[in-house]
Image (cartoon, helix red, strand yellow):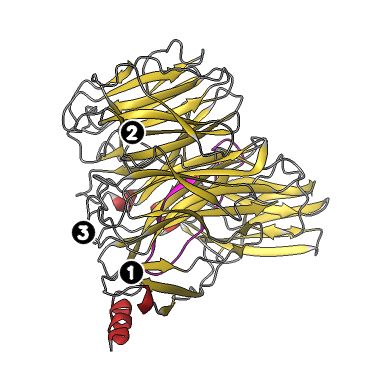
Amino acid sequence: MKTKIILLLALLYAVNLAIISGNKDNEKNITYLDKRIAQQDAFTNMNYKVYNFNVESDVFRPHLEQGFSTDSLVVGPEIMTGITGFYDYKTNGEANVYIQVDPSHPDSINVVDVTADTLDHTGITSRRTEYAFSTDGGQTWQASIEVPDALRSGYPVLHLRNSAAVIANHSEAIGGRLDANLYVDVVPQAGSFTQYGHPNPSTSPFGIWPQIAVYNNGNVGLVSRRNVSSSNPPETLYYSFWNGTVMSARTPIYLTSTNFNGSVGSNMRFHLATNGTGRVTVIAAPVNQNDTLGDSKIFSRTSTDNGATWGPVTTVFAPYTENSGQDTIATAGGSGFIYKPGTSTWFLAYPVSKISEGGALFANAKLVITRSDGMTYTITTRQQVGACTTYAQNMSFVFNIDFPALGFSADGSTLYCVYSVVMPDIAPTNYNQRDIFCQYSLDNGTTWSNPLRLTNTVNIDETYPSVSFWNRGTQGGPYQLNITYMKDPGVGPASFGGSAPSSKNFQIYRKLTGLAPIGISNNQNILKDYHLSQNYPNPFNPSTKISYNIVKLGHVSLSVYDILGREVAILVNEVQQPGVKHIEFNANNLPSGIYFYTIKINSGDFTDTKKMVLVK
């Protein structure tokens, strides 16, 4: 009878968190049939399978998804890193740097995450930073080491210095004070960390949510927010550095001047990144600094001498208006920041949305990327990824396209962006589910591939993605993208800003591999198949990008036709070399409607037609 009750409760919660009594002697295997997606859309080329869950006391363990493939890449299976716990709130600061691949040993992968035990899912006493590593390209994982050991810590970030892990977090390791500290492994993947704190550890100011960067002179820069309430201005960012022996004193690098009173915001977000040749930039997105339009800005400061001196504060983003001043566009949610190695170009990805339409923030969301040259481009929109337009219940500081993380291929040809999307699907906990998406750019962020949906599960949250800064990929060899994310059968936040039941979540590792289109270097990789991609964006106004693969030298014609079959544009009519090609179609002179584009290669080697929609 008891077993039947357990099974009934599990099914009623629809493979979410179930609070049931029992122990491992009562474990039963529950099979839950996921919905099958019939259509093949821009998000995924997958059909869905059966998910298996084990009832372990009050926890569901999700069955790990097998990999899948598209016509251009292979998405590997989900692999547990061994880091698991009950802490599901990771939005403070920009703690989204959880994975790093060692460029000198590409099969050596390091990960870090924040956890808490089941009795204290808010982490007030049990919050911990855990580190794990793989030596075989992510197939198996070793260790799960607390950093520091047996002490409260949180919001870690991970970088590499001489192949060894460098972790920063805030912890109570010194004098019981919550403060930013640095931990350096003695040798690569030893798991034996030496702690470095700031001078005068018992004296304010104290720092939280640290971000770090490893400089080419061996120093490690560290920036942290002053440990004060978000409602207690001014918010201050402090900068310090470790010289291989000791931490320097903290100095203010950014200070807010006004209180925040806008409608979009979160805790202060900030970043620190270097190009590896002495150039370093700090990004600050404080909620206590508002614009005349009533919402927050994003600022930067740059050093050209590894943080010894800093340039002036400059504005990266400020709210602006559209539609003759009727719509105010503001930033919201998390962000990702990276330098293109060896160059002076940095990239900042972040969501923006209209805030002047009766609070319908989510309906207008899009993810954009701003370069250091001031140019801003759209990565994706709510419509493209199918994000929700309203929340069933509030999730504090979570936007519907959020937590972007950025990385590069080894040869610098490919910029990757992985992010989380809040979907319309509602779990039995009455929270929206979240999934992971991925895109890439071959032209320094100007144009982006179609969104690839990496997860699509019933009553499971996948969120808080991270991507390695460095990923294997050079011309003629395989391109790999290494990511982690949180997989949580308890949909909705339990730690802060929510009321979902506490559930055990798992840090997942996943590898994407393919010659094309991810990581194409100068369009010269060898392609096995002809292919015409769906245009992006679609619908579009007034321009869109069309991509296609050419296997061998040949004549290519690419034309656009209206719904009556009349040719309205000739985009390509020439002999082309093999490779992946991209062309911009501008329909500024055409009316709204349905159009078709047809490619013909060598008068019969390959022909394909796809539909696109122009909406003005």
Q: According to the image, label 2 marks what residue?
A: 170
Which mark, by number, is residue 499? 3
The residue carrying pointer 2 sits among few (fewer than 14), some (14 to 19) or many (20 or more) residues within 10 Å by Cα, namely many
The residue carrying pointer 3 sits among few (fewer than 14), some (14 to 19) or many (20 or more) residues within 10 Å by Cα, namely some
**Could you tell which of marks 1 and 3 lies nearer the N-terminus?**
1
**Is 449 in the magenta?**
yes
* Residue 348 in view in this figure: yes
Q: Start and end of the magenta stretch? A: 442-466
Q: According to the image, label 1 marks what residue?
A: 16
Placement of 507 over or under 403, stated as above or below: below
Is 612 left or right of 203, judged from the image as shown? right
Give SS at disc 3.
Answer: loop
Give SS at disc 1.
Answer: loop
Q: Position of residue 6 (x, y in %)?
A: 30, 80
Q: Position of residue 130 (x, y in %)?
A: 43, 45
Q: Position of residue 490 (x, y in %)?
A: 32, 63
Question: Which residue is depicted at the point 23% across and 20% down?
Answer: 204
Kindly report the secondary structure that dominates the magenta region of the rendered protein: loop
Placement of 60 over or under 234, stated as above or below: below
Is 469 left or right of 256, judged from the image as shown? right
Q: Nearer the viewer, mark 1 or mark 2?
A: 2
- Residue type, mark 1 in image: Asn
Placement of 353 over or under 391, stated as above or below: above
Q: Nearer the viewer, mark 3 or mark 2?
A: 2
